[in-house]
Image (cartoon, rainbow, N blue to C red):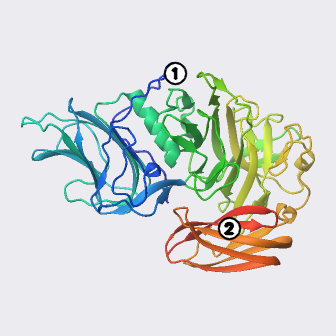
Amino acid sequence: MNNRLFFTIFLSLHYLIISAQPSDTLPRPILWVKADSAILGAAQWHDISGNGYNLLPHSGALPDTFARLNFNRAFELENDYFTASGLPFVNRDMTAITLYQMADTAEQAIWQIPIDSNRAGLTSRQLLGTWGDISYRDSNALFTIVHTLFRNWDWKNSLPTDYRFELLKADSLPFRGKVAECLLFDWHIDDTTMVEYISYLSLKYGITLFKTDYLSSDKRMIWDYSNNPDFSYSIAGLGRDDRLGLYQKQSYMLDEKIVTGFGEIAPTNESNPAILSDGEYMIWGFDSSLLSRNGVVYLDNGEEFEVYGNGLFQRTKGREIGGWENAEQGVERTVFMTVDGSEWDGSIENYYLLIDRSGTGEFRPGEIDFYMPDYVNSNNILHFSNIQWDADSNGIDRFCFTYVPVDSILSNRSLVINGGNSGDKNGNDQKRIKNQKITDEKANAYKVYPNPSEGNFVLEADFAERSDITVKLYSPEGKIMDTKTATGQQNYRFLYQLSVSGQYLLEVSGGGETKILKIVINK
């Protein structure tokens, strides 16, 4: 996917978020298309706004496969564009929000509105034919962008009775890349409305907004940037908002070094079976792109632990049925997390997730939990499961990762939680750390190598006892490419050969469990 997920808005707006009362009204666009609401191969991209301004592909049909942006559907296009006719722009004002990722850094078309011999529009670097005090990048980047632009025009020539909107077209410039959503308003939307929509898009597609709080569709603050500006380098989250169609169950974070989600990782967002309540959000923010060493935590027994990374977690509870009050909904939320530990030295299996329940970042004894990983794979990816965030319901946690030597006295404390058998916070029925490596405790073992690969790679699965096995290979778009089965063995070895670059998933079922492994192909 992308090296760094990023938010770009080419306007001099410094958002003052808005402690507004919840509202039942949310202004709607006159045109709204989503890849996850489209039909593959259809003759039009359906407008979900209800106004019927369906986009017609210049090629005559939508693609017959989906690409993916942060586990969600997108279309991958090359030199194709879409047209909708008859749009009313009575006030000569409009706002366009587009979500895309370019395949190269050449100047590319985003959208345009032809007006007589003139045109109002946007490329990835400049405005077309209209006025405004807006600064643009001198160069393009390949990360995912949500682009919001207000436009106004006042042509002296005769005005058309209606307008044509052309997505991914601007003069002769082609577009190469992925496009997931486009929203078009026939007026200059206010700052609050804009933040509601771009908050939705940023969480869905794993994009970081800078210098702004995040808002839900009913104007609740779901990420408090104003009081926590130091954690805005990389922001990602999970959540549900029925008004906007958000139902994000898993997400990449921190330049894809971390994947988190509800339950267990699935090949696509829609295939994750988790059920959330409307208005429920979990959001994580980091102070940099690094998971390198950044300090020491001291416990009351005199032990010191080196810590790596620095993060903030905020939770918003679901809306109560029949009202807008925050409610727990009676559901405990446990989360998985996979973490790339390749930057860390020493025994990777001895790195733990450390959560400060107070949210202060002081990591005081009695207010912290250590989570040990379920296992570490051959690519130094740590797998954590059954993480309970916001265990004290104060809405905020601080967290990092820490190295715990196997001979630490921490092995006798109730602070340590094993993700697969967590028990309660006081240590009842918890699985304690033993003075042995975590990998020795894991009954089943898996290897994918080499990873990254140039196309040829091996999957090895070693079970504690004889077991049947099923392995499904998923494409970067989340489609099943291959299924392998075998029976009655304890050790399995499968050979694969792929010819297209990308990130693929292997779903391995056997030995009483199902595991998801990632393989990166660089051709």
Location of residue 167 in the rendering, given as x and y in whole percent from the top left corner = 29, 50
Which residue does the image show at 69% across and 42% down from the upper left? 399
Quick check: 323 above or below 250?
above
Q: Residue 195 occupies which quadrant of the picture? A: top left
Residue 128 visible somewhere in the drawing: no
Considering depth in this image, is 249 or 120 the residue closer to the camera?
249
Q: Secondary structure at mark 2?
A: loop
Dot 1 amino acid type: Pro
Quick check: 185 above or below 105?
above
Quick check: 344 above or below 390?
below
Residue 379 image label: 2
Quick check: 518 above or below 16?
below
Q: Residue 85 occupies which quadrant of the picture? A: top left
Residue extending farthest left: 157
Q: Which residue, given by chain and number where applicable, does mark 1 sit on?
A: 22
Residue extending farthest top: 21
Q: CA distance from mark 1 to mark 2?
A: 46 Å
Question: In the displayed structure, does residue 226 sit left or right of residue 194?
Answer: right
